[in-house]
């Protein structure tokens, strides 16, 4: 993507000294609800008001949004509060209607990003406009689909882009509604450093109590903004009730969040951070060394198994190793999930090596 600087222009125009704050209900429910929340948010750090008009629900039979009627309520909320407006568009017709109602920023939902056909349709509908478009990550943990959606917009001449990290669905139940998988967002940020990156802690969390911590992590990772579902009466929201917070809670959160600058001018800080970074580099080298050593031993075992015609996979022994490592990990404050992931990866690599040895 050439000319990446262009990507930030729309956000730089806000001239903010804090991350962009997008807030508002999951869904527009009634005109009164939209106006009440918008007026309450006007008193906070919120820059942009969000509300879903067309709600893509995973299962039918839930509230599916008020439809185009809600666009009028957003226009009214903008007139009365001066907040910018954003809503989700999921096809060319939505784009058309949103443009006609002067919605300032459009977002593409997680269930849309998974479909290159629809992303392309939306890109065509927007071709040549300067409307900012925020692209949520796809539902499944697939960096290429996310990148692909950004590229489809960009190649349709839509340059005012941003991405929203809303977490990824998993089959197993975790503490999150959608697993954050921070690494995927960091990978995307590394590919397109000038693409504004916004966290949606609400859809990651699925519940109120971890929203603040998720926001803090995002700011520590230099995210450019937050999109937080906010409702004047969260418990009675028509969709996503468990994860919405009130405007006054949001206000308190934005006050308490620590915003870090990317680089500090202080030399003490610079010296310290350099030392610590060097230490990390040294340890990373050691890690690779030690993994190499472990693999050499695993290769020896592979040869031995070949000579004695023994199967590569020894499940019982593997489970014993894992159990010990989880206990040791606990002592070092490393989560069981982390130990499992690391050792599964190491084990898989050993199996690959041993199979190579046995089959040749
Ligand atoms: C939403 O923002 O309300 C929404 C439906 O989000 P997502 O596409 O991330 O599920
Ligand atoms: Mn929602």
Image: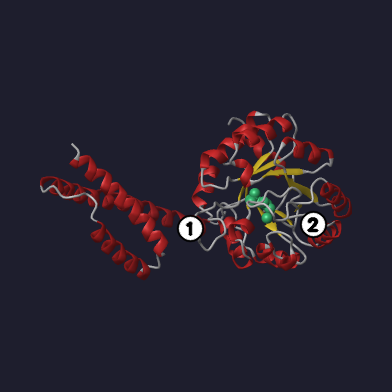
- Taking the image in four quarters, ligand 2 sits in the one at bottom right
Q: Look at the numbered disc 2 and give the secondary structure of its residue.
A: loop
| Percent position of residue 33, x then y | 82, 60
Would you name the residue on which mark 2 appears? 29
Q: Residues within 10 Å of mark 1 (few under 14, many from 20)?
A: few
Q: Residue at x 67, y 29 (%)?
A: 156
Q: Is residue 194 visible?
A: no
Q: Is residue 208 left or right of residue 342?
A: right
Residue 21, percent from left and from top: 71, 54
In the rendered image, is residue 96 in sight? yes
Q: Check residue 4 in the rendering and tell me which mark sits there, or answer none.
A: none
Relative placement, left or right, of 247 versus 134 is right
Residue in view at x 58 percent, y 64 percent: 213
Mark 1 or mark 2: name the one nearer the start of the chain.
Answer: 2
Is residue 72 or residue 62 the one in the foreground? 62
Mark 1 = which residue? 172
Q: Secondary structure at mark 1?
A: loop
Q: Is residue 294 above or below residue 237?
A: above
């Amino acid at each position: 993507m050439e000319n990446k600087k262009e990507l930030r222009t729309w956000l730089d125009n806000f001239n903010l000294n804090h991350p962009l704050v997008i807030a508002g209900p999951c869904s527009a429910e009634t005109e009164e609800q939209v106006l009440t929340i918008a007026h309450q948010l006007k008193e906070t750090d919120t820059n942009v008001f969000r509300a879903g008009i067309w709600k893509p629900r995973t299962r039918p039979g839930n509230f599916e949004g008020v439809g185009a009627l809600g666009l009028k309520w957003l226009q009214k909320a903008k007139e009365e509060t001066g907040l910018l407006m954003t809503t989700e568009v999921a096809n060319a017709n939505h784009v058309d209607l949103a443009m006609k109602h002067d919605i300032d920023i459009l977002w593409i939902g997680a269930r849309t990003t998974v479909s290159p056909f629809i992303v392309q349709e939306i890109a065509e509908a927007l071709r040549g406009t300067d409307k900012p478009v925020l692209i949520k990550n796809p539902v499944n943990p697939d960096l290429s689909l996310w990148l692909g959606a950004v590229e489809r917009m960009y190649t349709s001449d839509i340059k005012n882009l941003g991405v929203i990290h809303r977490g990824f669905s998993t089959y197993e139940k975790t503490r999150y509604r959608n697993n954050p998988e921070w690494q995927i967002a960091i990978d995307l940020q590394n590919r397109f450093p000038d693409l504004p990156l916004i966290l949606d802690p609400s859809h990651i969390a699925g519940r109120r109590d971890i929203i603040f911590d998720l926001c803090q992590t995002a700011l520590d990772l230099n995210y450019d903004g937050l999109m937080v579902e906010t409702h004047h009466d969260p418990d009675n929201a028509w969709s996503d009730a468990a994860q919405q917070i009130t405007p006054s809670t949001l206000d308190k959160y934005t006050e308490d969040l620590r915003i870090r600058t990317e680089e500090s001018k202080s030399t003490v800080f610079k010296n310290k951070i350099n030392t610590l970074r060097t230490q990390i580099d040294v340890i990373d080298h050691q890690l690779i060394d030690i993994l190499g050593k472990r693999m050499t031993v695993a290769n020896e075992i592979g040869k031995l198994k070949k000579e004695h015609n023994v199967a590569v996979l020894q499940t019982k022994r593997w489970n014993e190793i894992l159990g010990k490592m989880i206990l040791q990990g606990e002592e070092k404050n490393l989560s069981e999930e982390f130990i499992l992931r690391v050792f599964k990866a190491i084990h898989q690599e050993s199996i690959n090596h041993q199979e190579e040895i046995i089959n040749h």
